[in-house]
Amino acid sequence: MDPDDYNTDLYAVKFSSSDETKATVDEDSGLVTGVAAGAVIITAEFKYLVGEAWTSCTPAIKDTINLTVTAS
């Protein structure tokens, strides 16, 4: 689906981290920042707006990526 195909005020991809002590992720942009060494799962999910809350589709439309944060 192309972003031009839907109203971006009502639909969006939202990002999340399974463990924010390892990596944080900007919910809107998906920018990941490593915090501490370890494994973390980043999720991107297509959601729609109900009132002021972003809501998951049924079934959920999402995918994940496994990352390992390492010390530099």
Image (cartoon, rainbow, N blue to C red):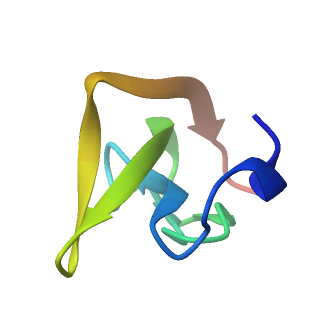
Q: Position of residue 16 (x, y in %)?
A: 41, 53
Closer to us: 68 or 26: 26
Q: Nearer the viewer, residue 32 or 14?
A: 14
Q: Residue at x 53, y 24 (%)?
A: 63
Q: Nearer the viewer, residue 56 or 51?
A: 51
Vertical placement of residue 52 versus 14, above or below: below
- The quadrant of the rendering that contains the N terminus is top right
Seen at 69% across and 66% down, the residue is 31
Q: How many tags in the picture? A: 0
Q: Residue furthest bottom?
A: 52
Q: Residue at x 49, y 59 (%)?
A: 11
| Rendering quarter of residue 18 | top left
Q: Viewed as shown, does residue 8 lie left or right of 64?
A: right
The x and y percentages for residue 66 are 56, 25
Give left or right: position of 15 versus 6. Answer: left
**In-image side of 51 versus 66 (left or right):** left
* Picture coordinates of residue 52, whole percent (x, y): 20, 81
Image: 70 above or below 67:
below
In percent of the image, x 46 and y 40: which residue is there?
45
Classify the position of the C terminus by image quarter.
bottom right
Instruction: Pick out the residue farthest to the top.
Output: 59
Task: Point out residue 61 in the picture as x, y percentages from the top left corner.
Answer: 44, 26
